[in-house]
Image (cartoon, grey):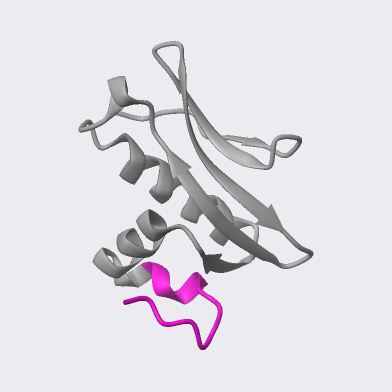
Amino acid sequence: MEYELIDNTQAKQYEYHIEGVLAKIEYIKTKDKIYLTHTEVPKQLEGKGIASSLVHSVLEDIEKKDLTLIPMCPFVAAYIKRHPDWKKLVLKGINIS
């Protein structure tokens, strides 16, 4: 299923609004870098692949905006490890393990 990605710059988070609840990835953005710090999916949405879909959409947006990624969130790092094509966005010298 396709969800609409919202970059809520005021709250400094990417969002999906699903079934009246909020799934999000919090971030810190500098001029050309973005630090993904925390992924959160409400309990009632767990197990539906929403977190993975959210990470994928966020990575596409980061690529489109030509930002360098610093994945501080363990879930985001694990996603990139499972999908190594996205390592191209990660700041050189950061080890995803």
Q: Residue furthest top?
A: 20
Q: Is residue 22 left or right of residue 1?
A: right
Q: Is 30 in front, or is 53?
A: 30
> Which residue sits at x=40%, y=67%?
86
Q: Is residue 57 left or right of residue 48?
A: right
The answer to which quarter of the image holds residue 30 is bottom right
Taking the view exactly as shown, the residue that stands out farthest to the bottom is 93
Q: How many marks?
A: 0
Query: Residue at the spot x=68%, y=42% of the render?
Result: 12
Residue placed farthest to the left in the image?
47
From the top left corner, tell me how far across and down residue 46 is, in percent.
26, 30
Q: Nearer the viewer, residue 74 or 80?
A: 74
Tell me: residue 79, above or below residue 44. Answer: below
On the image, the x and y values in percent for residue 81 come to: 30, 69
Q: Seen in the image, is 8 located left or right of residue 56?
A: right
Residue range (magenta): 86-97
Q: Which of the 4 quarters of the picture holds residue 66?
A: bottom right
Q: Quadrant of the C terminus?
A: bottom left
Residue 5 % position (x, y): 52, 34
At x 32%, y 35%, the residue is 50
Quadrant the N terminus occupies:
top left
- Say above or below: 49 vs 56: above
Where is residue 33, by image quadrant? Answer: bottom right
Left or right: 72 in relation to 56: right
Residue 92, magenta (yes or no): yes
State yes or no: residue 25 in magenta.
Answer: no
Helix, strand or loop for the magenta stretch, by majority: loop
Rendered view: 24 above or below 86: above
